[in-house]
Image (cartoon, rainbow, N blue to C red):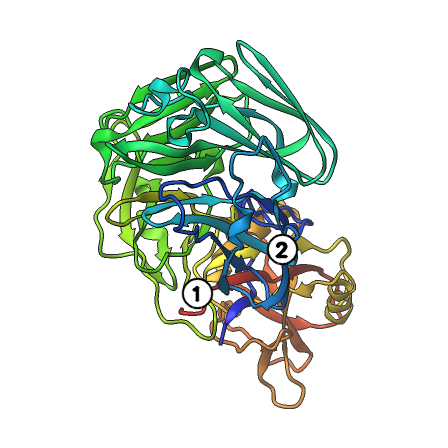
Amino acid sequence: MFPAVYLLPLMLLSGLSSESTATQSDNSTGKKYFIVLPENIASYHPIPPKNQIYVTALYNDTSVTIIQHTYNTRTVTMQAAESRDFILDGRLELGKAAISNNVLEITSTKEITIQAISFRNSSIQTALVIPTDKLAKKYLIPPIPQIQGSTLLADVVTTLVTERAPFKLIIVNGDKANKITVKGNVLKEVNLQPKQVAQIWVREKEALRVVEATQPVAVLFGHPCAIQSKCNCGLLYTMLSPARDETLKFFIPSTFPWEDETKILLSETGSAKIEAFSPDSPLIKVAGTAILYHPKLLLTLIPETDFACCYVVTPIPDMQNYAVIVVHKDQTEGVHVGKNPHQGSEWTELKGTDYVSTKITVQPRATPDSSISTTIIWHASSKMAVYFLGQDSNSIFGNPAPVISKSPADYRGCVLIPGVIKIGDNADGWRESLKYCRDKDMELICLSEAKSQPQATKRLSELNNGNLQEVWIGMRQSSLTGEYYWVNEDPVKSTNWQNGEPSIETSHKCVLMGAKSDKDFSWRSEDCCKAFHPVCYTETEILESWDD
């Protein structure tokens, strides 16, 4: 069974609009994706590629359709927090064609996240896939790593010998005809039809710095077979982030096991440079993008502005899988792995910053039916960065973990849709106030959990601005039993009655809450016909993984 989505009477209070119910998800979630599989020639014919995708659903009854070019179409129904892997047709791999139609199209009725995996013999790489509605028209091209046997020979060896070829850009077009311009010391232009892919070599002397398009595109950067040692190469690629003009902060975790060979590829408008990584200087500031480079890995780094509250990590069987977490040093206790607070690993200080990092092992577990196991990593009150990383005897792979939500979570779990709190416009009786809220598809506020009460009253105080003394809440006394109950049918677990309350007056059957901090937001019973403003709310929607 998948317990998955929970509707909970808790308002998300940080940055919450009093009216909006929109989800605060990041670039990872969407309903439509175009995916390509880069050429991977780490092992030659006859070893076939084993390419696949991991799809994670956020909501119950999500219908997912996978269209593999002209080769195959499949539709499945998934439940919230369920992940499935799909093995892809090997003919989708791009090869060397400058223009290709080999695009994998995925659509869904509700939001999902996707991680792509390219696997051929001992060469494996992973990528976080961006949905089509989050793509951009401009990307900055990273500087080219100097690799003996690959880039150092790229300008003198024919591109027909792929492991002696330059790096390349893979540009994936969306649903509209598009003109792509790649700028540097030379100008390259290409026109793409809907769902087409362009592959463009990136030679060092051309100093290509930016990709611009008339319509949104996705851009991958990498090498089909970068030399790692004598007569040994491996696929190397990453999904680029959209270009930004603002200066961003990147905190580089010091918990990677490969620090001695790591460099940072920095891209800004009009310039690019490569810096050696030092644990003594883990903070990078750049008005552009930053990519961590290792001879076996390209990892797009997460800027501080994109830190989020909830991520999903899907480990790959038969590999060593990790989650690397970066969080403010004062917020480590709020990190949760699955249902439980994170414990068991040490936090490493990122020198000269207020941040720390840690690495935890995440391995596949037994799952129901045909699903694959996932681990939800979330923070109860703050934002953080989470990376998915892994390795086997020959490969290192990884990508930014898919973001489920940027909305601060609460003590129960990962927020899919924040709750909303609103003070009613007019003062009226309790029954009329209940109808007022329900006419707005809301409910009179119910505070059945003691932990939810401080958060709700904090938001109430912000909205009230000191104007109201008391407000109606969704509790009243039963005329049949005399017991108090919540209108949303939650059990009455924790109360905050004023001294001497609830009143024994037979007419006092409905409950008011103080609306100002000097009253400590305590409760008292009152005549249901008295006129007070109501507090309406919608429930927070929580995602919880099946193994919790």
Task: Please identify, in this view, whether the residue under mark 2 or under mark 1 is nearer the observer.
Answer: 2
Residue 390 point in image, percent of width and height: 32, 48
Q: Confirm whether residue 64 shows in the render.
A: no
Dot 1: element: loop
Q: Horizontal placement of 488 versus 150: left or right?
A: right
Closer to the camera in the image, 371 or 122 = 122
Q: Amino acid at mark 2?
A: Tyr
Residue 271 point in image, percent of width and height: 46, 13
Q: Residue at x 35, y 67 (%)?
A: 365
| Residue, disc 1 | 372
Residue 216 in which image quadrant: top right
Q: Residue at x 34, y 50 (%)?
A: 121
Q: Amino acid at mark 1?
A: Ile
Residue 213 point in image, percent of width and height: 66, 26
Closer to the camera in the image, 326 or 111 = 111
Disc number for residue 71 = 2
Which badge, 2 or 1, comes first in the chain's sequence?
Answer: 2
Closer to the camera in the image, 223 or 305 = 223
**Above or below, comparing residue 256 to residue 184 in the picture:** below
Dot 2: element: loop
Residue sitting at the far front: 46
Closer to the camera in the image, 423 or 107 = 107
| Marks 2 and 1 in Cβ contact (< 8 Å) | no
Q: Residue at x 51, y 38 (%)?
A: 95
Disc number for residue 215 = none
